[in-house]
Amino acid sequence: MNKGLMVGIIALLLIGGVYMYSSRQTEPKEDADAMITEVPTEAQPTGEVAMMEEADYTIDLQNFSFTPNVMEGKAGEILKVKIVNVGGFHDFVIDELGVQSTQIAEGESEIVEIMIPKDATGEYEFYCSVGNHRAQGMVGALMIVE
Ligand SMILES: [Cu+2]
């Protein structure tokens, strides 16, 4: 037997085996790349925070009054009222219109949206529902105007 020929055949088998093994290894990569797809995302509108801060009225709340204590609104509109607590612990309520703010502490503020019904007329009382504040005179009026 020719030793040189045997070595040559073994070497060829080894090289061929390594080539086949390595080429099989690289195959799945293409599939992995195809799996990655771009998911389109819609752009978020900006300026929403700024719009939230705009209010038709700003009312100071303190023991035991609203300033101002009279507001005007039109039937069918949404009135944005910023309530600012300048002293004490208060909220803002209009029973007939389903308006109930959270109770806010001194130094805090909140925007309250009042949805005035299309058939609203006359005036609606707003008041503070904390403790006996309403009885102490912490009330005001929303007047419906034409
Ligand atoms: Cu109060």
Image (cartoon, rainbow, N blue to C red):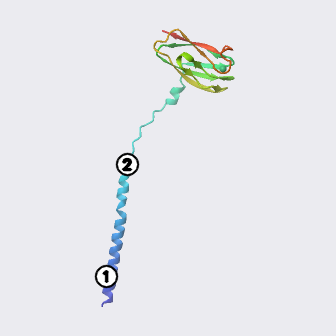
The percent coordinates of residue 92 (x first, y second) are 60, 20
Q: Secondary structure at mark 2?
A: loop
Mark 2 is surrounded, within 10 Å at the Cα level, by few (under 14), some (14 to 19) or many (20 or more) other residues, namely few
From the top left corner, tell me how far across and down residue 69 is, in percent: 61, 13
Nearest to N terminus: mark 2 or mark 1: 1
Residue 46's place in the image compared with 131, above or below, is below
Along the viewing direction, whichever of 125 and 5 lies nearer the viewer:
125
Q: Position of residue 94 (x, y in %)?
A: 57, 17
Q: Residue at x 36, y 60 (%)?
A: 28
Q: Is residue 83 visible?
A: yes
Residue shown at 43% from the left, 37% from the top: 43
Q: Is residue 57 left or right of residue 24?
A: right
Identify which amino acid the numbered label 1 is placed on: Ile
Q: Position of residue 53 (x, y in %)?
A: 54, 26
Residue 106, image quadrant: top right
Residue extending farthest to the bottom is: 1
Image quadrant, ligand 1: top right
Which quarter of the image is occupied by the N terminus? Answer: bottom left
Q: Looking at mark 2, is its residue's CB closer than 8 Å to ligand 1?
A: no
Q: Tag 2: residue type?
A: Thr
Give the numbered dot on residue 9.
Answer: 1
Question: From mark 2 to mark 1, how far is it between C-alphas?
Answer: 47 Å
Q: Which residue is mark 2?
A: 37
